Amino acid sequence: MADHSAFFLISLLTLTAMQGIHAVDYTVSNRAATTPGGMCFDNKIGAEYAKQTMKAATDFIWRLFQQNTEAGRKNIPQVDLFIDDMKPGEIAFTSNNGIHYGDDFIQNIPVDLIKQEFSGVMYHEMTHVWQWNGNNAPNIGWLIEGIADFVRLKANYVPEVWAKPGEGTMWNQGHSSVAARFLDYCNDLKSGFVAELNKKMRDGYNDNFFMELLGKSIDQLWNDYKAKYGN
């Protein structure tokens, strides 16, 4: 009995150590604490809620991208959130695994929507942390942003101002929600399509990825998408 107990304890300690090694740390720094938006963050959102959202977003993204092993995802030990004194109209951006969130935007979120809207933007930005970017392929911005909004869409953080299904003149023009809706349509055609597309974007990008995964060109898929909604 003692031998079994010792083995169980060693196994538990080993598992705990492995989880500790591979855990992601999340930090929050309010560098605009004296501005109205910075104070709003502290009073209405708070660092603890922000960290919980960052972790929840990471877990959600890994599941959605089907990144079940460390070999299939980025090796990022820490993600930082900075509440910054940014210009009016600036929302957020991600750089070097750091998310910079504008204080002015936070200040102008309606009180009854503040955590929902804050979380929606965080899911978008956390996607930029974890997604593959096509190895910086040219003319891929629409897809990078579209996938980030697709994640936000699947997490049920959809603002009223977003494009409705079927709206938009082209998949790569207009607000990124146009691309997100189109990707959602493609994902309905083949469950896990966006996860597979993201995996292929680890080393580069080509529009032919749509043909390889769905059997139709991106142009034909867009035409089918528009026809489905009659607009």
Image (cartoon, rainbow, N blue to C red):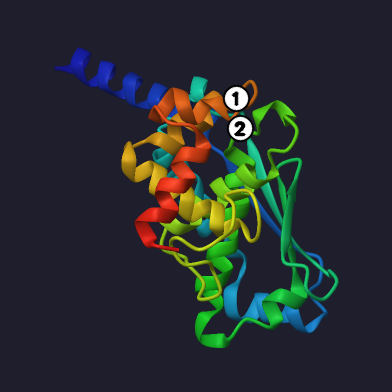
Q: Which residue is mark 1?
A: 202
How far from the left and from the top, in percent, is residue 113? 52, 80
**Badge 1: residue crowd in 10 Å (few <14, some 14–19, many ≥20):** some
Can residue 38 be seen here?
no
Q: Is residue 72 above or below residue 133?
A: above
Identity of the residue furthest to the top in this view: 3
The image's mark for residue 32 is none
Q: What residue is rendered at 82% in x and 80% in y?
A: 35
How far from the left and from the top, in percent, is residue 94? 72, 50
Q: What residue is rendered at 75% in x and 73% in y?
A: 103
Q: Quadrant of residue 50?
A: bottom right
| Quadrant, the C terminus | bottom left
Tag 1 or tag 2, which sits nearer the N-term? 2
Taking depth in this image into account, of 63 and 29 the one nearest to the observer is 63
Left or right relative to 156: residue 126: right
Q: Residue type at mark 2?
A: Trp
Q: What residue is rendered at 53% in x and 64% in y?
A: 120
Q: Which residue is mark 2?
A: 132
Taking depth in this image into account, of 51 and 132 the one nearest to the observer is 132
How far from the left and from the top, in percent, is residue 196? 44, 29
Q: Is residue 62 above or below residue 42?
A: above
Q: Residue type at mark 1?
A: Arg
How far from the left and from the top, in percent, is residue 127? 57, 46
Q: Secondary structure at mark 1?
A: loop
